[in-house]
Image (spheres, grey):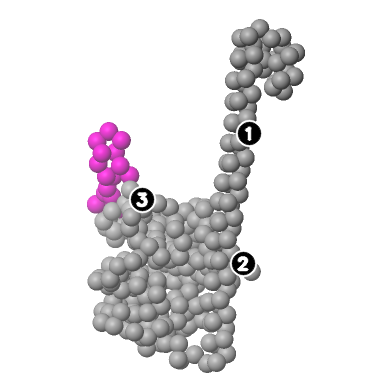
Amino acid sequence: MESYIRFDWAMKRLLRNKANYAVLEGLLTTLLEEKVTIQKLLESESNQEDEFDKYNRVDMLAENSKGELVLIEVQNNNEYAYFQRMLFGASKLVTEYINRGQGYDKVRKVYSVNIVYFSLGHGKDFVYHGKTEFVGIHEGDILELSPFQKQTFKVDRVSQLYPEYYILKVNDFNRVAKTPLEEWIYYLNTGNVPEHATAPGLDKVKEQLKLDRMSREELNAYYKHLDNIVILRDNIMTERAEGRAEGRAEGRAEGRAEGRAETQTAIARNLKSLGLSTEQIQAATGLSAKEIEQL
């Protein structure tokens, strides 16, 4: 198998070209299980980069043929509040892409697709889907749309009106790719495409995202990007290791202090039972008069 350009780099440099939309369309078609055609790429306050984000993350906002918004984000660095970040990004899109004075029926459908290279939350799967449903507290039934609403909004379920979230936990994939979605996850994980892959868009990856298609300058920039990602992850691992070591050291120190305190208390209790004065016990153990009186 050949090695191909990492997806986050491709999003930054290549996939914004309309000629390469088929790669993104293939990923989204595979993930959403319906044909997705990208009409155009959009700019949003939600997908602006800052200096730290150069290597840490990359966003792309697309509009499909239905007028729906699709925010794709690749995140390399661990972020404990990432769930809230997903919510913020989707919510911003909802408010950004409706004109003042328009009715709520003009609110755009938003898909938030998150490709994360860190351990987000705790779960056994490597792809998660989140949507909004209203469940009856007493009957346990799902609140449904009226026939008029279905006809007007051209959807079948309430959840189709709300943002939907997809999380692809790329690093958690460690199996042989057997389905189109697994073939995509395999590429996102390894930078390689399974030899007999059939997933939509991966044929375009093979054609358009080969390393040997890049110029020397592009390759140098690309390898610098990879080095920065490695450094970023090494820094994270170092911080975690140092934090664990400091925690263990603090724990040992606290344990020793607690042990000394328990020993002093036991000695003071024995001396008190022998009838020694509070002053004598203080001199022997270092405990305060109040501590001794409470024994």
Q: Residue at x 37, y 83 (%)?
A: 205
Give the quadrant of the C terminus: top right
**Distance of mark 1 from mark 3, alpha carbons?**
51 Å
The magenta segment is 134-149
Tell me which corner region of the image, top left, top right, bottom left or bottom right, holds residue 212: bottom left
Q: Residue at x 44, y 71 (%)?
A: 62
Q: Which residue is drawn at 35% across and 72% down?
A: 186
Q: What residue type is labelled 1?
A: Ala
Residue identified by numbered label 3: 132
Local SS, label 1: helix
Q: Do the residues labelled 2 and 3 touch (CB within 8 Å)?
A: no
Instruction: Tell me where residue 249 appears, x and y as whole percent.
Output: 60, 46
Residue identified by numbered label 1: 257
* Residue 181 visible in this rendered orientation of the protein: no
Residue identified by numbered label 2: 52
Sequence order check, earlier mark of 1 and 3 = 3
In this view, the mark in front (2 or 3)? 2
Q: Nearest the camera: 242 or 187?
A: 242
240 relative to 182, above or below: above
Q: Nearest the camera: 154 or 162?
A: 162
Q: Which amino acid does label 2 sit on?
A: Phe
Task: Kindly give the residue lying farthest to the top in the view shown.
Answer: 275
Q: How crowded is mark 3: few (under 14 residues within 10 Å), some or many (20 or more)?
A: few
Asked whether 97 falls inside the magenta stretch, the response is no
| Chief SS of the magenta region | loop
